Every structure is written in structure tokens, then in C-alpha cells.
Amino acid sequence: MTNEINKRRLEKILEDVNMQYYFKEPLMLTSTHKTPIYNNEENYVGSVTKSYKNKVHRYVSLFMNKLYFNYTFYDEEGNTISTINNIMDNKKDFMKSRWIYTNSQQSYIVHNVTKVLTNFHLKIKSESSIIYEVKRDFGEHIIHIYMDNREIGYVKYGIKLPREIDIYIEDEHLNLDLVCFIYFIYKMYGS
């Protein structure tokens, strides 16, 4: 019954989707190669890449890839649009992950509130309130993004390598760069 509800919900979303994007996941998540992102008309819209502060971080990431999480999103001309970096203020941040997302207009704190690894759960907050909630249930290949208990987008991914990632955005307030970062957070910390 739950699968039927999810199917109906997915079909409804597909009818109302405003924006669709896709990219292929890099084979190694530690790669600094720019991953191109295309819209549904196959036009290049930007790219995302993992970045490191120095060479030591890059080599440490080969063995402990969750330690340094820094990604940058570029527009079609190669200009930096936004970044996301992990916050390491104290020892608790090594156990419960937090990231700061910044672009030219705003910055959000992304909290990993996952209690059971099979049910990935993030909360994205501004200084005053919770903006978005991100969830993925066990056995699904879809990451749902909610705002005020209303689904405003999702990321669908395959299991065959190299993975094709499909991004569907219904709300103009949800940024493509943030959704890409959410997917990479899931790949590093939720799968």
C-alpha cells in the first residue's frame, strides 16, 4: 500500500514538475573533476566539483572521505555560484555532521538529523527557522525535499554505474545548486 501511495505521489509530481535537470555521478566522489549538469532540453546549465583547501586534505580524503566535505557549484560561464563546507567547530561535529551552504544572497546551515542510517534525514535552516526538510526512506532511490510539509522537489538516482541523477524542482525558491549539494551529502553520509 505504501508503494502505491509513493507511486501516485511520484506521478502527481511528474505532472507538475517545472524544472528538470540531470548529471552523471563521478565514479570517485573524491575526484575534483567538474561534473556537468544539463536541463531536460540538454542545455548545459552549470557544474559541480569537490574542492580541497590543500593537497593534504585531498590525500586524506582518499582514505577518510567524510572528513572534508567541500563542494563548489559553477554557472555555465565557470563563475562560482555557491559553496558548501563542513563545519568542524568542536568534537561533536565529527559525530553529527553540519555544513554551511553559502551563495551571494543567503547562507543556510544543513544539519544531519538521521537517527537510523536507512532513513536519511536532513534539516536545512536559516538563522530564524527551518526552511527545508530532506528525507529518504529505506529501499527508495528517491530523495524527497519538503518545505512546510509540501514536497517541492526530489532527486532520483539509478543503481547502475555510472549513476544518472535526475533532479526535479517544483518551487522557484529551491536552488539547483543546493539540491546537487544535498545529493552529494546523501552519497557521503547517507548511503
Image (cartoon, grey):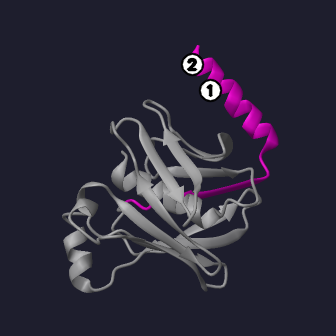
The magenta region covers: 1-27
- Magenta stretch holds residue 139: no
Q: Name the residue type under label 2.
A: Thr
Residue 93, position as x, y percentages in the image: 28, 62
Secondary structure of residue under mark 1: helix
Q: Which mark is residue 6?
A: 1
- Specify the quadrant that holds the C terminus: top left
Label 1 vs label 2: CA separation?
Answer: 6 Å
Question: Relative to 150, is 94 on the left or the right?
Answer: left
Question: Relative to 118, is 135 on the left or the right?
Answer: right
Residue 17, position as x, y percentages in the image: 77, 46
Mark 1 burial class by Cα count in 10 Å: few <14, some 14-19, many 20+? few
Say which residue label 2 marks: 2
Going by the picture, which residue comes out furthest to the top? 1
Residue at the image position 39 percent from the left and 59 percent from the top:
27
* Location of residue 137 with respect to 36 vertically, above or below: above
**Residue closest to the eye, 126 or 17:** 126
